Amino acid sequence: MDAAVKRFFDSDLWFSFTRSPVTVVSAIVAAVCILGAVFAPWIAPHNPFDLASLNLSDAFKPPAWSEDGAREYVLGTDDQGRDVLSAIMYGARVSLLVGLSATIFATLLGVTLGLLAGYVGGALDSLLMRICDIQLTFPSILVALLVDGVVRAALPREVHAEIALFVVIFAIGISEWPKFARTVRGSTLVERNKEYVQAAVRIMVSHVLPNVLGPVLVVATLNLGLAILSEATLSFLGVGVPPTQPSLGTLIRIGNDFLFSGEWWITIFPGVALIMMVLSVNLLGDWLRDALNPKLR
């Protein structure tokens, strides 16, 4: 274990990371966002979704540094008297959960179909790639909206409310798998013609897959930011996660109703949190793409 850690800190990847101030700052911001979301129940000043603790007399309080602000509400409160800072931390939990789950689902599906297409070839390869081509002509958010709309029409409202979170994860994941499939398929076509692959047993899993994980990791990192944005967009449009499990997109939508009446903090702060989270993940993905590219070493 110690030897593996030592090799990592002596690797070109770690050297590249420490020599990029933008990447280091992005990693710190991403870590703060993730830790704040994961440990929200323990470190958040309030539980914004505990109805028993809400007080409508605390509604629309501005941030603490404002003249009418209160110290216990650092970023102010919303129309229900909920602490905005706590709501952001709890909302980020939902956004990260949906984004990460959808990315994992898209990765597993895309990698599996990409390996099959690249290794088997022939009619299966043509069929899968044509499906990818067709789906890539549509924006991912439209595909996600279509899937969510079909599920809403097919299921009773009560049933859909219970599984809404899983529907959003499936809708976003199914809209993103072609990116992984095409990446893995291209790498597989290169690897399958090498001599060590032609003579191997259990080729795809033990030999081809490890050699295509680099590009997949890059695509997954970049896709995580897109998945979080897709979830926020769906929730902002009112077709994402249920109101009982509000994400950052839901908080922005709620605050948007009061933006022009002077309560700007209700939507601005969740929006800034979303931007910081997505931007930091995307910058890490850009660095990872360059660091894993042997032509740039």
Image (cartoon, grey):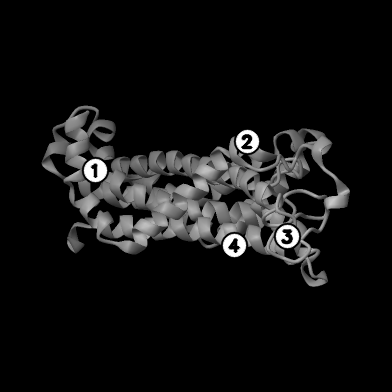
Q: Is residue 98 left or right of residue 8?
A: right
- Crowding at mark 1 (Cα within 10 Å: few <14, some 14-19, many 20+): some
Q: Nearer the viewer, residue 287 or 145?
A: 287
Closest to the camera, between mark 1 and mark 2, is 2
Q: Which of the 4 quarters of the picture holds residue 252?
A: bottom right
Q: Position of residue 193 (x, y in %)?
A: 18, 45
Q: Give the CA distance from mark 1 to mark 4.
A: 38 Å
Residue named by callout 2: 41
Q: Look at label 2 and name its amino acid.
A: Pro
Residues at marks 4 and 2 touching, judged by CB atoms closer than 8 Å: no
Q: Residue at x 31, y 40 (%)?
A: 120
Identity of the amino acid at label 3?
A: Ile
Q: Where does label 3 land, which residue?
A: 266
As drawn, the label of residue 211 is 1
To which quarter of the image does residue 38 belong?
top right
> Does residue 238 appear anywhere in the picture?
yes
Cα–Cα span, label 1 and label 2: 40 Å
Identify which residue, 15 or 284, lies in the foreground: 15
Q: Which mark is residue 272?
A: 4
Callout in the foreground (4, 2): 2
Which quarter of the image is occupied by the N terminus? top left
